[in-house]
Amino acid sequence: MPSASTYFRGFYNNPWDGTGYPGGYNTKNEYAITEELGFRHYGSLLNFAVSLYNINITNRNLNSVINMGSGANTVAYQTTLNGGGNTLRGADMEFSTRPWHHFSPYVSASYLHASEDNDVSVVTENGAISTIHTKGKTAVLAPEWMVNAALNYDDGHIFGSMRYHWTARQWADEMNTEALPAHGQLDLTLGYRMNNVWYLKHPQIQLNIYNLGDFHYLSGVEAITTNAYQTTAANGQTVAQNSPAYYVASTFAAMVTVSTGF
């Protein structure tokens, strides 16, 4: 859903489409046409699925933040930007097994080729509205690869899982000049489940460890921009740089929980 402020007329030129922000009177509905073809198999031991897809999006909604003002007077506004038309083509793959000697592995991967279908509007340094050449470039927030792997164990009492997630780089601006680097994270769960005790049904104690490797990385794009560096618009005028902003991932954390049913 677009942020609520998107539906209200703003008070400054939006570098994306020349309308006001944090809102804008040029908000448009997002439409998508999707075709998908796949095959899945669930067996006595092995499960797997693979699918191919093609998605055409009109007026792609992009959640972002716009920072207005400078220094201590800077205010961040949640908004939804019109990313124009996008074409997404890719494949999803998934593989797992039924428990074998209490172990069950899981692997999934996703390939994505996402491209911009049109040039985007910008406001040049002298206030004119023009466009920059983004048609054919890779869409923002569209990692080419994502991979997940997990190994689970459960013998009825002792249980646990180790999970790893990896995401390829993602462009943070429409001109494909600044990207969120590729990143991965390893998480771990260990626990013990007891027999019923009095009115307590299978009480258990569980240790959850997040970011086991204590990786330090940027985890997402907070503010998407049209151009991270100064560029030239179609009318020959200069478009000032507009740097993206990012989220910082949480570092190592551990939590112990005790739970039971009744």
Image (cartoon, rainbow, N blue to C red):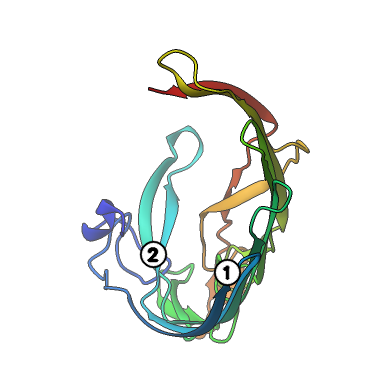
Coordinates of residue 145 in the picture (x, y in percent):
67, 69
Q: Earlier in the sequence, mark 1 or mark 2?
A: 2
Residue 163: tell me if it is visible: no
**Nearer to the camera, 87 or 75:** 87
Q: Residues within 10 Å of mark 2 (few under 14, many from 20)?
A: many
Residue 98 x, y percent position in the rendering = 63, 58
Tell me the residue at 45%/73% (across/down): 122
Mark sitting on residue 168: none
On screen, 106 above or below 247?
below
Residue indicated by mark 1: 142
Which three-letter amino acid code belongs to the residue tagged 2? Leu
Q: Quadrant of residue 81?
A: bottom left
Residue displayed at 66% across by 47% down = 218
Relative vertical location of residue 197 with respect to residue 219 in this rendering, above or below:
above
Left or right, 258 with respect to 155, comes to: left
Q: Secondary structure at mark 1?
A: loop
- 14 vs 145, left or right, is left
Whether pointer 1 and pointer 2 mark residues with C-beta atoms closer than 8 Å, the reply is: no
Q: Nearer the viewer, residue 47 or 34?
A: 47
- Label 2 sits on a secondary structure element that is strand
Mark whose residue sits in front, 1 or 2: 1
- Amino acid type, residue under disc 1 in the picture: Ala
Front-lying residue, 165 or 27: 165
x and y, in percent, of residue 37 in the image: 50, 86
The residue under label 2 is: 81
Q: Where is residue 35 shown, x and y percent of the image? A: 43, 87
Q: Is residue 216 above or below residue 257?
A: below
